[in-house]
Image: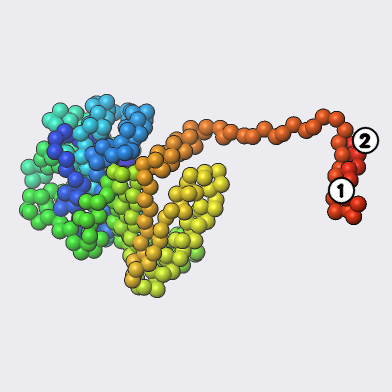
Amino acid sequence: MRKLIAVAVLLGGSGVLAQAQSGIQLIQPDAGFVLGVEWRKIMDSSVGAALTEQIKKAPIPPMPAAAALLDALLNDLDSVVLAASASELNKTAAAQPPALVILKGRFKAELRSQLKGMAKKSETYHSVELLTAPEDGAPATASKNRIAFLDADTVVAGDIREVRAAIDRAKTGRLTAARGGVLDGITELASKNDLWIVFELPANALKEAPPAAVEMFSGVKGAELGMSFQQGFGLQMNVRTKDDASAVSVAQALQGLIALGAMSQSQSPQAGEVLKKIRITSENSRVKLALSLDRSELEKMIKEAQSSAAGTPKKTVAPAPEPAGPKAVRITGLDSGPIEVPFVQPKN
């Protein structure tokens, strides 16, 4: 699945910007988790140059036409949506639930041809060609994943059942409405942010969590998270809880965690200052978290992270040299005033 996602994200096309929220219509009607990436907006934002530099430094995957796909990632991809259904997320045996990936852009015929050459095999479903993902590992795992070009603007990828269901929705016109469940308010969230996530907390999510975490988040139903990089860095998060009392409890817990995090950043003062700027409030059954950094603050944070990742040695202050000559011990607090007594180094 990891290589499938990598291949899907490396796809792209040039032309009109397609926002990730436009891919919501093809996701599962009972989606319990949705991730949206407004890729083109991010690349054109204040962090775009730094992100491009990091992508170019990364090793190219060992696959045919990797250079062409990397160029498409940098210049042509518009947006990505990844979703999983609530029913699959709630299955205790589903360690990695079947996922669906929707990519938007203007897809070139050359890219489709290159992917077809990489695929292990292909099949047709409702006049749409499904390519078997070029995955390593067990054949049974590889056979479950497909990549399909719905049209010149849309690619779907993921579990074969999820891909076929998305094709059915596209062909019959029974598209998913952006309302109800986790999709309530998703259009506004997506329009204001470059990276966004909505999810319902699965019933078994805290099964293996420490008792303290279970108690802390037992009242949480789900959350909405949005990040924007257009004017620096903006973060907004809404945690949905069971009731007003749960919201107050979760808000207090988050405030405590952030305070502890800020105190532990003695080696990273910039990160500590950022944590102190996070504002948390509770409003009815929701906990709202917000953070805003201007471009200069964001650049400082990025430089600090890069220095830390590169292992840049921190500057140390050399201790002051001890004075030459005989040493003395100064005694204060006497009625006659302070006095100095010669200090004799004891012999070993």
User: Is residue 154 something one can see in this rendering?
Assistant: yes
Which one is nearer the viewer's eye here, 312 or 66? 312
Q: Secondary structure at mark 1?
A: loop
Which one is nearer the viewer's eye here, 229 or 293? 293
Mark 2 neighbour density, 10 Å: few (under 14) some (14–19) many (20 or more): few
Rendered residue at 39%/40% (across/down): 296
What amino acid does circle 1 point to? Answer: Pro
Q: Position of residue 51 (x, y in %)?
A: 34, 35
The mark tally for this picture is 2
Which one is nearer the viewer's eye here, 199 or 90? 199
Q: Quadrant of the C terminus?
A: top right
Residue 338's tag is 1
Q: Secondary structure at mark 2?
A: loop
Q: Position of residue 95 (x, y in %)?
A: 36, 53
Q: For the residues marked 2 and 1, what is the alpha-carbon distance in whole angstroms? A: 28 Å
Q: Is residue 173 above or below residue 53?
A: below
Rendered residue at 16%/33% (across/down): 14
Mark 1 neighbour density, 10 Å: few (under 14) some (14–19) many (20 or more): few
Q: Is residue 17 above or below residue 283?
A: above
Rendered residue at 50%/57% (across/down): 259
Q: How is the image coloured?
A: rainbow
What amino acid does circle 2 point to? Answer: Lys
Q: Which residue is under mark 2?
A: 347
